[in-house]
Structures are given as structure tokens and as C-alpha cells.
Image: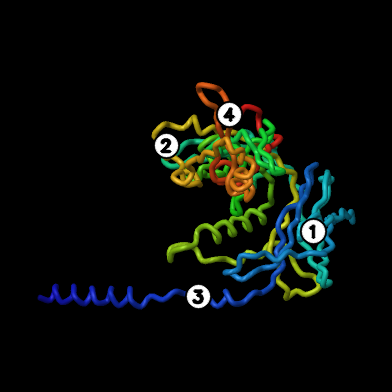
């Protein structure tokens, strides 16, 4: 009897807990400290340096406020100055620095409202080559790995990020194009059947170190996972891994940032730590600034992956267009010679795209043209481009 009563009380307690839950709206959502956000690193080699300046936004905001009109320069501890130019709103760049390795460097910023920011002076690190980038098929996707080493045992701390490119196809191969009120054959170099999609995932950075090893070696470190359900690995996929050598302080910064952005969500996860970085506002010490500036050369390695190499039982990707709504139509040629008028009605809006010429099997004369919705014919609708990237091998 006592056990039964305790069970009832426990059930009532559970019911009370579940019914009293309310969505938590933290006060910080409505407060924007307007910190300056500095993204990028100083590429001390022959590649370009890009520094992006913006302002913090509310947690529920979907827009980024670029910091435009700033004066940005790289300075050495021996008074060398390398100015950056604003190449697009909030993005500042310079090329071919090839910085001497016998000095330290910092980033110096004057905003358009005359606030002065600077990073700490940082050692110029040299990134060793990437030994290999390889992959392993898992249950529902593909895991990519990187291996590297420094024979001089000087790097120890590493950071990687990546960008990705993949191919995809439309439902129909279109031979025709409607432009200038006419139906013509497409140029073979401008087909819209095969497209290339490029992306740089917003949280695609990884850090590791070899401080606990006698040799400066990083082996089989996971740098990116691609789920089959995304469609990226259905045909041909390319991963371009970028490696930079970083300092111990930079490693701590990026490691904390990784934990704060990826490992939160339950009461057992670590609480967010303060991750401000190595930048400071000189003119107003109370003004916040976020980011960490490193100085390093960068090494890269690209890998191509063909989806056809996956086992037959691998999860299949569902096309972004609805196959049921991709049925093709037929525009016949009639004796009344109203084809031009009907072409205008069918194709002028651009929502419908012509596919191919249809000929009679008996007379081999043209009887009409097929067409389908644009989303099923023009692969560019899905956000990609039909222009093959210069690094893409012919035939892939």
C-alpha cells in the first residue's frame, strides 16, 4: 500500500514538472553590446590576407552589420607597416606579404568613428606541408581526416579549416534555350545540367596539438564529416583543407570557441567561457572586441571523392526538386503556324524551360518540343553554377 502511494506521488511530481516548463528567453537576446568582431589571420606567405570586421548582433538576428570605412594595417615590432584595402564592405585585404620571420606582427585598426584597436604582437609561424587528406565511409556519411608532421618539432599547435565543392545534376538535360523571343540550341559550353556548389561551413575549424608526443606528428585527425542525406557526396565531392601553425594562446582560444559553439546543449556540457582573444581597444579599454589574430603561412591540400565508390546499400540522397512535379510537357508544331505565339506563352516568363526537339520516328521531321519546370531543368536554381571551377579535373 505504501509502495503504491509513493508511486502515485512520483507520477504527480513528474506531471507537475512537465506542465510547468516554460521557454527560457535570456535577457541577452534584447541587449547588443556592439562589440567589434575581427575575423581572419595574417597570412605571412605569398597568399592573400583577408580580415573581416563586423559588429555583434542580437542572438535572434539574422543580419550581419559590416564595419566599413576603417583603416587597417599590419605592423611589425620593427616598425614595418603593411596597409590593407577594403575590397568589399567590411572586408580588408592585401596580397603577397612574404613577411620576414625574424619579427613579430600585430593588426592595427582605426574605425570610422576614430576608435583604435590593436592585437598583441604575435610570432610569425611557418606551417609545415599537409602529409595527406583521406576519407572513410561510415554508416550514414563520409568522415575526412588529415595527417601532418613537422620534422623540426617546432609547430606543435595546428588549426585547420576547409571549403567544399560538389557536383549535382538537374532532372533533364536541356538542348534548347529560349532567348530574344526565339528558341535556339544551347551552346555546348553553357549547358545547365551539371552544376558545382561551393561552400565554406561557418563552423568548419579544428585544432589539435602534439605537445604530449615526442615527435611533432598529427595522424588521422578528423576534419570534416559529410552526411549522405546532404547530397554533397552523391556524385563528385571535393574537400580543400587549409592548415595554419598557431601559438599555444591561439590554440586555447580556438579550443574554447569550439567547445562553446558545439558542445553546449545539456546540463552535463561545459558552461560557456569568456573567449575575447588577443585584441584590445586602445582608445577605450571598456569597448569590447572579439577575435584572435594569428600570423602564419598556410598550406593546403585538396581531395576529390566520387560517390560511385560507395557501397550499393549506402543511404540515398533525395533530390531537392519534387520528381512528381517534374513531368515534361510537349509543345507541338501545328498546321496553323502558331508556334511562335505559343512559345512566347510557354517560355517567356522563365518558369518553364525547353528541353529538346522531338522528331517523328517515321518521317524524321520535327513534331514539337518538350519542356519542364525550370527547377527540374536548370541546375543553377539550386544555388550552384554551371561554370566548372579551374581546379576541377576534366572528366570528373
The local crowd at label 3, few if under 14, some if 14 to 19, many if 20 or more residues have their Cα within 10 Å, is few
Sequence-first tag of 2 and 3: 3
Identified at 58% across, 59% down, the residue is 256
Contact between marks 1 and 4 (CB within 8 A): the answer is: no
Q: CA distance from mark 1 to mark 4?
A: 67 Å
**Dot in front, 2 or 4:** 4
Q: Give the vertical position of 239 relative to 68 (above or below).
A: above
Name the residue tied to disc 3. 25
The local crowd at label 2, few if under 14, some if 14 to 19, many if 20 or more residues have their Cα within 10 Å, is some
Sequence-first tag of 3 and 1: 3
> Mark 4 falls on what kind of element?
strand
Q: Left of 355 or right of it: where is 1?
A: left
Q: Nearer the viewer, residue 152 or 338?
A: 338
- Which quadrant of the structure image shows residue 53? bottom right
Sequence-first tag of 1 and 4: 1
Q: CA distance from mark 3 to mark 1?
A: 37 Å
Name the residue tied to disc 2. 314
Q: Position of residue 363 (x, y in %)?
A: 54, 22
Q: Position of residue 203 (x, y in %)?
A: 59, 53
The local crowd at label 1, few if under 14, some if 14 to 19, many if 20 or more residues have their Cα within 10 Å, is many
**Dot in front, 2 or 3:** 2
Name the residue tied to disc 1. 107
> Mark 3 falls on what kind of element?
loop
Amino acid at each position: 500500500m505504501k509502495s503504491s502511494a509513493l508511486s502515485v506521488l512520483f507520477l504527480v511530481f513528474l506531471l507537475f514538472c512537465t506542465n510547468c516548463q516554460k521557454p527560457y528567453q535570456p535577457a541577452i537576446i534584447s541587449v547588443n553590446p556592439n562589440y567589434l568582431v575581427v575575423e581572419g589571420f595574417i597570412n605571412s606567405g605569398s597568399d592573400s590576407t583577408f580580415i573581416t570586421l563586423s559588429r555583434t548582433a542580437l542572438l535572434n538576428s539574422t543580419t550581419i552589420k559590416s564595419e566599413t570605412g576603417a583603416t587597417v594595417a599590419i605592423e611589425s615590432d620593427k616598425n614595418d607597416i603593411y596597409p590593407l584595402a577594403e575590397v568589399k564592405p567590411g572586408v580588408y585585404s592585401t596580397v603577397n606579404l612574404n613577411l620576414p620571420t625574424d619579427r613579430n606582427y600585430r593588426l592595427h585598426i582605426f574605425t570610422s568613428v576614430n576608435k583604435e584597436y590593436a592585437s598583441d604582437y604575435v610570432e610569425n609561424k611557418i606551417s609545415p606541408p599537409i602529409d595527406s587528406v583521406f576519407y572513410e565511409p561510415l554508416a550514414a556519411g563520409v568522415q575526412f581526416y588529415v595527417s601532418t608532421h613537422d620534422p623540426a618539432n617546432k609547430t606543435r599547435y595546428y588549426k585547420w579549416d576547409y571549403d567544399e565543392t560538389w557536383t549535382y545534376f538537374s532532372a533533364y538535360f536541356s538542348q534548347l534555350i529560349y532567348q530574344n523571343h526565339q528558341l535556339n540550341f544551347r551552346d555546348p559550353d553553357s549547358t545547365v545540367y551539371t552544376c558545382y556548389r561551393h561552400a565554406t561551413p561557418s563552423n568548419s575549424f579544428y585544432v589539435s596539438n602534439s605537445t604530449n608526443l615526442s615527435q611533432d606528428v598529427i595522424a588521422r585527425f578528423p576534419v570534416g564529416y559529410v552526411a549522405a542525406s546532404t547530397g554533397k557526396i552523391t556524385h563528385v565531392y571535393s574537400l580543400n583543407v587549409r592548415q595554419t601553425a598557431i601559438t599555444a594562446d591561439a590554440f586555447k582560444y580556438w579550443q574554447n570557441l569550439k567547445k562553446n559553439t558545439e558542445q553546449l546543449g545539456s546540463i552535463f556540457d561545459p558552461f560557456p567561457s569568456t573567449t575575447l582573444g588577443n585584441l584590445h581597444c586602445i582608445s577605450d579599454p571598456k569597448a569590447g572586441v572579439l577575435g584572435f589574430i594569428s600570423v602564419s603561412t598556410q598550406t593546403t591540400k585538396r581531395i576529390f571523392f566520387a560517390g560511385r565508390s560507395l557501397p550499393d546499400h549506402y543511404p540515398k540522397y533525395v533530390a531537392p526538386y519534387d520528381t512528381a512535379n517534374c513531368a515534361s510537357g510537349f509543345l507541338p508544331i501545328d498546321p496553323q503556324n502558331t508556334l511562335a505565339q505559343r512559345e512566347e506563352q510557354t517560355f517567356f516568363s522563365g518558369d518553364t524551360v525547353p528541353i529538346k526537339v522531338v522528331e517523328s520516328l517515321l518521317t524524321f521531321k520535327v513534331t514539337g518540343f518538350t519542356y519542364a519546370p525550370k527547377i527540374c531543368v536548370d541546375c543553377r536554381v539550386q544555388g550552384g553554377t554551371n561554370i566548372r571551377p579551374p581546379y576541377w579535373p576534366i572528366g570528373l
